[in-house]
Image (cartoon, helix red, strand yellow):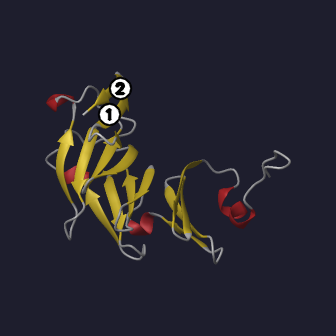
Amino acid sequence: NKQTKSFSPFLPLLKQTTGQPIRQILEHGDYLFFTIRGRVLRYNKKTKGSDFFGGERNIAHASHIAIDKQGRLWIGVNTGFVYSDADQKEFYSIDLRKQKFRSDSSNLLTLSIQEIGNRLWFSIFNHGIYIIDHTQPKPMLVSRLTTDNGLPDNTVYATLPDNNQAIWMPHNNGLSQY
């Protein structure tokens, strides 16, 4: 309540959120999306209905969410990425455990997802940046940036494109432009 400068729980989601660590919130159209304990909660602001996306859709250990220009939900999970159709009815996986870009089999922690041009940039803790071309009928991994090819640090917390075509990246060794 801004007038009384007090905080209160959001009653329509009280049961789903009380005492839970909510890591991210994202708004798209009539929906709010949240990451809660490795799952994604979708809340319809008009109908007040909600549902969880979890293991049944290969969504395990969800760490970050984004919506692309086509309205698809993208989710960073411990094995790579999961993306949906625009209605969040069908979900598809991009499993990075099988990719030639992967140097080990450790779990992944997505720190950020940023749409830059026709690509999605996924910043992964200790694994650099994975770049996905999502304009194809089946999105595909097209490149990876790491310290092996000039990235100053393999933990990039975010990527931010500016109006001059530069991409800003905060990381454990400072701030860089690309």
Residue 167 falls left or right of residue 23: left
Q: Secondary structure at mark 2?
A: strand
N-term mark: 1 or 2:
1
Badge 1 amino acid: Asn
Q: Point out residue 102 in the picture as x, y percentages from the top left corner.
A: 20, 43
Q: Quadrant location of residue 136?
A: bottom left
Residue 2 falls left or right of residue 87: right
Q: CA distance from mark 1 to mark 2?
A: 16 Å
Between residue 57 and residue 9, name the one nearer to us. Answer: 9
Residue extending furthest toward the right: 4
> Mark 1 or 2, which is nearer the eye?
2
Between residue 89 and residue 116, name the one nearer to us. Answer: 116
Please name the residue shown 22% across and 64% down the image.
135
The disc placed on residue 54 is none
Q: Point out residue 178 in the picture as x, y percentages from the top left corner.
A: 24, 34
Q: Point out residue 65 in the picture as x, y percentages from the top left corner.
A: 44, 55
Residue under pointer 1: 126
Between residue 160 and residue 97, name the one nearer to us. Answer: 160
Residue extending furthest toward the top: 173
Q: Is residue 153 visible?
A: yes
Q: Is residue 116 above or below residue 124?
A: below
Q: Point out residue 3 in the picture as x, y percentages from the top left corner.
A: 83, 50
Residue under pointer 2: 175
Q: Is residue 76 above or below residue 158?
A: below
Q: Secondary structure at mark 1?
A: loop
Q: Is residue 62 visible?
A: no
Within 10 Å of disc 2 (Cα), the crowding (few <14, some 14-19, many 20+) is few
Q: Quadrant location of residue 90?
A: bottom left
